[in-house]
Amino acid sequence: MTIPSQFDAKAIEQKWYDYWMKNNYFHSEPDHRTPYTIVIPPPNVTGVLHMGHMLNNTIQDVLIRRARLKGFNACWVPGTDHASIATEAKVVDKLKKEGINKNDLSREEFLKHAWEWTDKYGGTILEQLKQLGCSCDWDRTKFTMDPDMSASVIKSFVDLYNKGMIYRGYRMVNWDPEAKTTLSDEEVNYEEQQGKLYFLKYKIESSEEFLTIATTRPETIFGDTAICINPNDERFTHLKGKKAIVPIAGRIIPIIEDEYVDIEFGTGCLKVTPAHDVNDKALGDKHNLEVIDIFNDDASLNSFGLHYQGKDRFVVREEIAKELEANGSLAKTEIHLNKVGTSERTKAVIEPRLSDQWFLKMEELVKPAIKAVLETEEIKLYPKKFDNTYRHWLENIRDWNISRQLWWGQQIPAYYYGDGKEDFVVAENIEDALKLAQEKTSNFKLETKDLKQDVDALDTWFSSWLWPMAVFGGILEPENKDFKYYYPTNDLVTGPDILFFWVARMIIAGYEYTGEKPFNNVYLTGLVRDKQRRKMSKSLGNSPDPLGLIEKFGADGVRVGLLLSASAGNDIMFDEELCNQGKAFSNKIWNAFKLIKGWEVSDSISQPESSKVAIEWYEAKLNQTLAEIEDNFEKYRISDALMGIYKLVWDDFCSWFLEMIKPAYQQPIDSVTFAKAIEMLENNMKLLHPFMPFLTEEIWHLIKERSTEEALIISTWPESKPFNADLITDFETTIEVISGVRSIRKDKNIPFKDTIELKVINNDKFSTYFDSVIIKLGNITSFQYVSEKVDSALSFRVKSNEYFIPIAGNINVDEEIAKLSEELNYIKGFLKSVQVKLSNEKFVANAKPEIIENERKKEADALSKIATIEQSLASLK
């Protein structure tokens, strides 16, 4: 079998992915084995692969491949989320470019376009995940708008409504004027922005007096329905019961009193706009104020805005300030920092707006989810620091606004039969709705044509909170074999940014519908940032093309590069050099494999002692690393697990083990050692496979021909065995001895082909177990233990042991003495300068502690070097 001289990732990646797919290795069916299940955090159907996806899905693939090797029935369910807001925006934009206005279409016509768009672009990201090597069970791919998934959502809504947990209410909501829909509180991000504070003058009716009121939003004066003062504020006592005139609008509004107004804040009085501020709405309800909504759904002003009608709110803000100044109603403006709510999806500034919406009561629903994570720890978050975030969100939870003014999504199953607010029924389909409506009204002449379904869609998160159950049919058929076998799932890997949006809500839904947790563990990854700690984004142009990285460094190289710095919960400072490091690791492994396969094997030669010792040491090191890996995986320290394997393979296997067993130039290796080397290589490939699936599968099949039942992906994880820790400790000392020998060879230009002698005074009673290795790797003809110092020799120390290399025939003694004497004089001079500095009381009193510490370290190093050189000189004279 010809082995290519260079490792070519591109040449093998598609080959092995096709092989895995062809042989159905990713697919899972319930059987006698213990299941290991993970569900993918479904990416938006609009999405394409970005660095966050790369990290998240690589970790999931590592977990699922390792579970497969450990004998579990591994099932990784992939899928996508319909992403109501993002997808509808994409479709609306596409239609606009085609000259089609969404408002001119019926719901059915629009949905036809949405499905066409989804069918054309919706699978992009899942195909890209295959290039990364993700071993998902593609036969189980789900989409949150699949018929069974939608049916699960509708069934859930009806069930919760019938339990009295879903209600319709007229409340202040967060309005996204770009997406033209409401958002839940959690979908609003608050950003500090610099704006202006406008001080407006309101004339008191039948008076020349003015009240000055500060506002950040002068355009909202058209919705003012009162001015509020504190009844205990003596400055405004004379205004009780009077009225004021709204600037420009000319509308007369009452001056009301309420202790809600902070006397010390601002001017001590405020304008009340009940339609556009949640606190103003509470005041308005208390004082029976008129509610005037001044905005259209795109946040332009409606007819209440008078001559500003049809203009955008921010345009009006600039223009109305000029008009107010011109007519004397603007007292002054100040620069003002203000926290502004923006849409998590569209980034548009949110408008508080009164609206009839559907809400889910959360107070009782949330209790089992709080208990599971924070009390019983039935579900564990990794890292644990996120428990506090989880607690804050869930203990301060408010009712969830679950309706959206969109067409793309599950349509709310409420059917109206009259004009009254309560003239509706909730049912899974229109036939059931008709029966309920007939019973409710006692009007059995009602027909389906008399019913009108609510036009709104459900919040996308209301769909995806059922994900771990719905993908296995657990909502529609809770007794089906897949759901009973795979649920609860094992691990969830996601970002902390959706800990509340998705993770907490899945936990809530799991306990509500099954009485069980949806998963055991939640691994929260960090965000991928650039070297300057900036979050990666298209707008900053700092996010590399993931597929471009795979093309350049290979999928295995990218996976390793990402994971080496991906500690749980900590952000990753991404640098392409990390992927280059991963690629270099691939090449290192490939070259080690080529070296082994290039050896000639002989059955007729005996195994050298150095090889026997090397094998025993490496087996101990392998089992030590295995124990550390298991511990790291249990604690979800995936990066640490990879680093342990990385060091084992690069340092211990490639740099030491292979050197220890390598046969002499053009000589064969004994068959016993060769068989063990292959066995160790295979174990390494098993450990590396979850992280580097393509390279390891390629080498696995190049080692020898394998049947499809013997593929690496379905082989067995190495079994952890007891190991001799003393062997590992003793070899660390052996490395120091070999390094000492090599340093002298290098410093004195003694070629490795020239044999040397080594003598040692074994003061520390070091084990002699690795002497054969020291002899081989130092090219030593004789290794002797002596009781006295050796004359005419070069020396070095390892702990208290003294090692001597006789110099006869290797170096010129006189030249070496002269060289060492010169070096000794230099270091003594350096030591003197340091000690003079340290004896200077003024310097010691005024210098920073770290500077003093550094000088003392210099002194200690110089004294150590002087002792070593003096010892070498003594042995030469």
Image: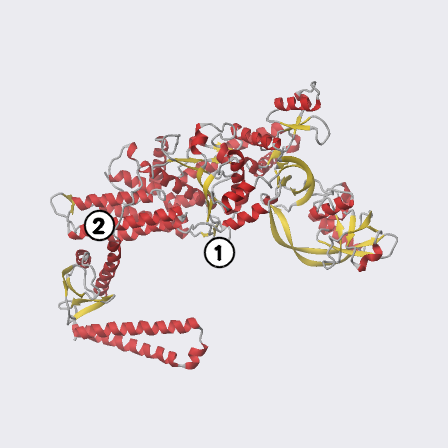
Q: What number of labels is visible?
A: 2
Q: Residue at x 66, y 21 (%)?
A: 448
Judge by depth and name the residue closer to the eye, 94 or 602.
Answer: 602
The answer to whether marks 1 and 2 mark residues whose Cβ atoms lie closer than 8 Å is no
Location of residue 672 (image quadrant) = top left
Disc number placed over residue 532 in the picture, else none: 1
Q: Distance from label 1 to label 2 (Cα)?
A: 46 Å
Please rate how many residues cluster around mark 1, counting C-alpha atoms within 10 Å: few if below 14, some from 14 to 19, many from 20: few
**Is residue 45 visible from the viewing direction of this image?**
no
Give the x, y percent position of residue 663: 17, 50
Q: Residue at x 38, y 71 (%)?
A: 854
Q: On the rendered image, what quadrant is the C terminus found in?
A: bottom left
Q: Secondary structure at mark 1?
A: loop
Mark 1 / mark 2, whichever is N-terminal:
1
Vertical order, 863 against 318 (above or below): below
Q: Which residue is label 2 attached to?
A: 616
Q: On the rendered image, what quadrant is the N terminus found in?
A: top left
Judge by depth and name the residue closer to the eye, 706 or 91.
Answer: 706
Q: Among all residues in the image, which is located at the extreme right?
A: 206
Q: Among all residues in the image, which is located at the extreme front?
A: 376
Give the x, y percent position of residue 515: 51, 35
Please, what is the three-letter code of the amino acid marked with disc 1? Gln
